[in-house]
Amino acid sequence: MKRRDFISLVGGTAAWPLAARGQQAAMPVIGFLHTTSPDTNADRLRAFRRGLKDAGFAEGENVTVEYRWAEGRFDRLPALAADLARRNVAVIAATGGSPAALAAKAATATIPIVFGIFDDPVRLGLVASLARPGGNATGVNFFNVELAAKRLELLHELVPSAKRVAVLINPADATNAESQLSALNSAAATLALRLQVLKASSSGEIDAAFAQLARERPDALFVGSGAFFLSRRIQLVHLVTRHALVATYSSRDYAVAGGLLTYGTAVTDAYHQVGVYAGRILKGVKPAELPVMQSTKFELVINRQTAKTLGIDVPPTLLARADEVIE
């Protein structure tokens, strides 16, 4: 082999890692912004990644995901969203409720955003309309706010003797809290229920709220929807159990943890759709061309073991309508 050919071969070999690094750097990057933490969202992350895969993308193979977790501190979301915008990611998946979506929207008017929220995205100003979003954002509406009245009706059906119901909301998620209370007040008037509102936006405030509940002993408890409460579901269910309260929650996750009755969107399906939309945008579809999806799958889950512990006989009509009964 000639010396010149040998040098050329060596030079080419040395260039291979550089070329590989260049290909890796060229992979599109998704910014994943969430209001809580990864340890409380394992199922949702799997659903999101499954949605990406269905759209032709696998994390670490042909797409990179930069995760930003607010750990329940909503005040951190603007800085986290701004960091993703500075990195000029290809798309931001803003999940876990409206605070993340609004923070992403405030951080950029050009980077595509796929949100997963509980409230009306038109009323929040995220999109012009559900069918024609019209800007740089689209996504999925989980519908849990709209289901608040139905959940209160189910609670009343479970314990028809209840007259006073405590409602736990998160004031840091103001839009979600206000929407739920509006729906609940209307439903309570129809059901002849009196509502007592308690507020908590930290673990310490949850403990304080339950100390008040222990003193005042309402007939039942309605735990508001939202990513923060969901991330504290073990704490909430533990306190409800300790104080022997009849409670309703917004997601199946609570029933799995020992919660009595849950009714709400099948949230993992919604996260799957967020992944699909993020993948479609990576392929060149504009957010304005993707209508906002509205959840159509809802789950009524009853933990019968918890009911027995509380001495509650679940009406057969309610059991018959349940999508899942945990024995």
Image (cartoon, rainbow, N blue to C red):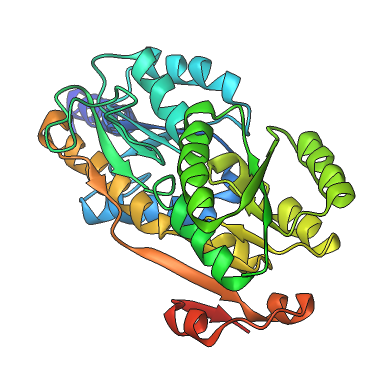
Above or below: residue 300 compared with residue 240:
below
Q: Is residue 156 left or right of residue 263?
A: right
Res. 206 in view: yes
User: Toward the viewer: 132 or 287?
Assistant: 132
User: Toward the viewer: 177 or 112?
Assistant: 177
Residue 164 in picture, x, y percent from top left: 69, 53
Residue drawn at 58 percent across, 46 percent down: 224
Q: Quadrant of the C terminus?
A: bottom right
Q: Is residue 121 left or right of residue 195?
A: left
Q: Is residue 294 left or right of residue 235?
A: left
Q: Which quarter of the figure has residue 162?
A: bottom right
Res. 231 in view: no
Q: Which quarter of the figure has residue 242?
A: bottom right
Residue 28 in picture, x, y percent from top left: 27, 32
Q: Is residue 81 left or right of residue 139?
A: right
Residue 297 in picture, x, y percent from top left: 33, 63
User: Toward the viewer: 175 or 29?
Assistant: 175
Q: Quadrant of the N terminus?
A: top left
